[in-house]
Amino acid sequence: RWLFNQAVCTLYAFCGVLFGLCSLTSLTVLSTVCCLKVCYPAYGRCWDALSDLCLPPFLYGPEPYGTACCITWEASSREATLYILALFIFCYLLPCLLILVSYSLILWTVRVSRRAVRQH
């Protein structure tokens, strides 16, 4: 069971979500910068990553087994549903799609470059 009070549970879950988002965001920025440097070298040198922080609603509580805390996925309010949906789309699906597109462009550029080198 969770050993601490609700405030610590909320802080623990908030930090888990925040650090997870930071990790995925840094991987997304890294893949985008790599793509720019490999596929568009003229633009890769002058690109700066900007970060923005917004605070989500505090929809955190114990996990089903009660040993840790996370987002309360079964929250039924409209705001909670919209937050979870926005979190899934904008903080998971879009970054994953951007990472896949970036590395696909890198692989395509490397393949085209290798063919050009072979022909010469």
Image (cartoon, helix red, strand yellow):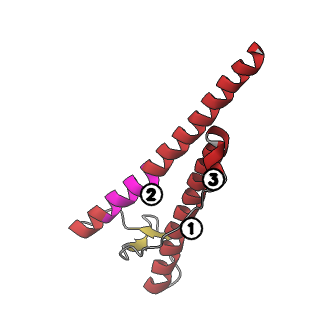
Which-is-in-front pick, marks 2 and 1? 2
Q: Are marks 2 and 3 in contact (CB under 8 Å)?
A: no
Mark closest to the chain's N terminus, 2 or 3: 3
What amino acid is labelled 1 in the image? Phe
In the rendered structure, the answer to whether residue 118 lies left or right of residue 106 reads right
Quarter assignment of residue 84: bottom left
Q: Which residue matches tag 2?
A: 91
Question: In front here: 109 or 99?
Answer: 109
Query: The residue tagged with tag 1: helix, strand or loop?
Result: helix
What amino acid is labelled 2 in the image? Cys
Q: Which residue matches tag 3?
A: 30
Q: Is residue 76 magenta?
A: no
Query: The residue tagged with tag 2: helix, strand or loop?
Result: helix
Question: Which of the image's four quarters has the C terminus?
Answer: top right
Give the x, y percent position of residue 2.
50, 76
Height in image: 116 above or below 11?
Answer: above
The span from disc 1 to disc 3 (Cα, nearest Å) is 16 Å
User: Which residue is found at the position 35% from the left and 75% from the top?
Assistant: 57
Height in image: 21 above or below 120?
Answer: below
Q: Is residue 89 magenta?
A: yes
User: Which residue is found at the position 37% from the left and 67% from the top?
Assistant: 72
Question: In front here: 17 or 120?
Answer: 120
Give the x, y percent position of residue 93.
43, 48
Label number found at residue 19: 1
Provide the residue span drawn in magenta. Answer: 83-93
User: Which residue is found at the position 46% from the left and 65% from the top?
Assistant: 65
Quarter assignment of residue 40: top right
